[in-house]
Structure formats: C-alpha cells, structure tokens
Image (spheres, rainbow, N blue to C red):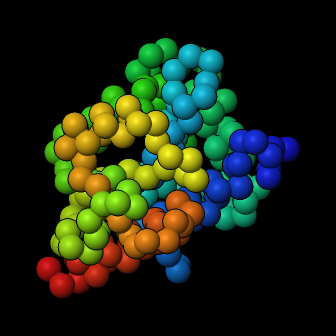
Amino acid sequence: MASLGQEAHVEFIPPMIVNALFVANGHRADTRLHLVFELSDDYSRILTFDGAKLGDLGGLTESSLLEVCSRLLSAGAGLTKEGSVEVDEGLFVRAISFERWVKALVAHAPAFLLDPKGGELRDEMPLTDAVVVMTDQLQLPKNTRKGLLRMGLKPVSLGNQMLFASQCITLVHAQMDAGSASA
C-alpha cells in the first residue's frame, strides 16, 4: 500500500480486477484474471481470480483489493517451482514462469496478444473462451513477445490510442459480449 504512486505502480491493479471480474449486481463467472508478478526472489508469481468460484473480496476499494493481492503473494512466498495454492475460494497463487503459464493457457483456446500494430480485435469475432494477453504500461521484452508469437498468439489491436490495461479489459469484454450476443 505504501508503494501507491511509486515505482511499483500498484494503483493499476485494482481497476484491472474490477473491470475484469465485476458487473452491476454481480461478477463474470466466465472470466479468469491472471496477474503476473515477474520480479520475485525466485519464481514469478501468478495471482488468479476465478470468476466461477470467486467469493467475497472484502469490497471493491483500492485498499481492499490490494490487500487481497498482498495476502495472495504472502501465501505464495514459500512455493516451489510450479507449485500452487488456493488461498481462498477462487483465489490462487502459482510459482511459474510467465511463458510457461501462457503456454498452458493457450493449449486449447484461441489466443491473442494486444499489440498496437496488430489487426483489429473486432475482426476476430466471435471470441469464445479466448485468452487475451496484455501488459501494463511497460512493453513486453522483445524476446518474450517473439516467444508468444511463436506459441501462436495472434497480435490484435483495440485502436490506435494507448490505453490502460483496465480500459483494454473493458473493451475486450465489450467485444466478447457483442460477439456472443450475435452468435
């Protein structure tokens, strides 16, 4: 919490959680949000919020959502490579590399990488059970991007304006919702 507005930029996390999982009077049971924390002492940590099993997060305030993330990271501190634990209903933490995790996710689903130079996401309709990979305000390292493309992720764009990840999530959901309504 003390790092709000500092180097860690954790203030971007709560709106991503809210925009990915919550709608008026409920949440999206068809959505899983995976937050990747690369800079750890040993293995990357991936926090998963599973909308199908999600329980109470203690509120939707910035402080309560960051507290959930902090609790998950603390619970995953002792995990060995590729270990995982369900901390609360629908809340998981895993110790696995980003690339290995994406490879597991895209094995049986259409997969896209948000990229300003990609084709239009709306041209990919309908989007059903798709995996959409995006980053925060920092670009993916070139080798990571190349690896994702080799895995078969298709570069797609949401327009020519650089947006916050939380805004991208909302636009992706709008495209998916529109596609499922017309299918």
Q: Which residue is drawn at 35% across and 60% down?
A: 117
| Quarter of the rendering containing residue 115 | bottom left
Regarding residue 97, the answer to whether it shows in the image is: yes
Where is residue 181? Give x, y as percent.
Answer: 23, 83
| Quarter of the rendering containing residue 12 | bottom right
Q: Residue at x 30, y 34 (%)?
A: 147
Where 40 falls versus 172 (above or below)? above
Pick whichever, 90 or 73, lies toward us. 73
Count the numbered circles shown.
0
Q: Is residue 47 left or right of residue 112?
A: right
Where is residue 163? Give x, y as percent.
Answer: 53, 67
Where is residue 137? Give x, y as percent.
Answer: 58, 53
Where 175 falls versus 15 (above or below)? below
| Quarter of the rendering containing residue 125 | bottom left
Regarding residue 75, the answer to whether it shows in the image is: no
Q: Is residue 153 left or right of residue 72?
A: left
Q: Pick the quarter of the image with the C terminus.
A: bottom left
Q: Is residue 117 left or right of residue 111?
A: right
Q: Which residue is drawn at 33% across and 29% down?
A: 100
Q: Which residue is drawn at 25% across and 47% down?
A: 153
Where 106 falls versus 65 (above or below)? above
